[in-house]
Image (tube, rainbow, N blue to C red):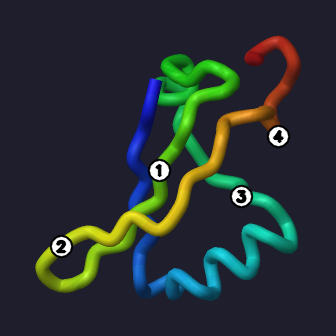
Amino acid sequence: MTYLHFIGKEYYSISKFIKEAKLFGVSRRVNLLMLKKFEFGDKIYLFQWDKTSSILFGYFIFEKILGLDTEII
C-alpha cells in the first residue's frame, strides 16, 4: 500500500526535514487505527503544501515500530 504524509511548513522546511532524516531516519507518530493498516515495506510519500499546490519531496519505507508494548504490536 502507498500513503501520503504532509509535513507542515511551521515545523520543517523541506531541506531541514531531509537533513534531519539523513542523520536520524524518519520517525512519525501514528494512531493505532492507522497503524493497523500499515504493512512492513509500505511506501509513505512526503509532501509539503506550497500555497497553490503540493510538493512531493521524498518518501520513506515503513520498516519498524518503536515505543509500543510487544502485546500491542
Gap in Å between the C-alphas at discs 2 and 3? 24 Å
Q: Position of residue 14 (x, y in %)?
A: 52, 81
Q: Mark 2 sits on what residue?
A: 53
Q: Is tag 4's residue or tag 1's residue first in the polypeptide sequence?
A: 1
Q: Mark 3 sits on what residue?
A: 26
- Residue type indicated by callout 1: Tyr
Element class at badge 4: loop
Q: Position of residue 27 (x, y in %)?
A: 71, 55
52 horizontally vs 26: left or right: left
Image quarter where the C terminus lies is top right
In front here: 58 or 66? 58
Q: Residue sitting at 79 percent across and 33 percent down?
A: 64
Q: Residue sitting at 82 percent across and 40 percent down?
A: 67
Q: Is tag 2's residue or tag 3's residue first in the polypeptide sequence?
A: 3
Q: Is tag 1's residue or tag 3's residue first in the polypeptide sequence?
A: 3
Element class at badge 3: loop
Q: Is tag 2's residue or tag 4's residue first in the polypeptide sequence?
A: 2
Q: Position of residue 23 (x, y in %)?
A: 86, 73
| Proximity of marks 4 and 1: CB atoms separated by less than 8 Å | no
- Residue type indicated by callout 3: Val
Dot 3, crowdedness within 10 Å: few (<14), some or many (≥20)? Answer: some
Gap in Å between the C-alphas at discs 1 and 3? 12 Å
Q: Residue sitting at 53 percent across and 37 percent down?
A: 31
Q: Is tag 1's residue or tag 2's residue first in the polypeptide sequence?
A: 1
In front here: 57 or 5? 57
Q: Mark 4 sits on what residue?
A: 67
Q: Nearer the viewer, mark 4 or mark 1?
A: 1
Dot 1, crowdedness within 10 Å: few (<14), some or many (≥20)? Answer: some
Q: Residue sitting at 28 percent across and 74 percent down?
A: 49
Q: Mark 1 sits on what residue?
A: 45
33 horizontally vs 16: left or right: left
Dot 4, crowdedness within 10 Å: few (<14), some or many (≥20)? Answer: few
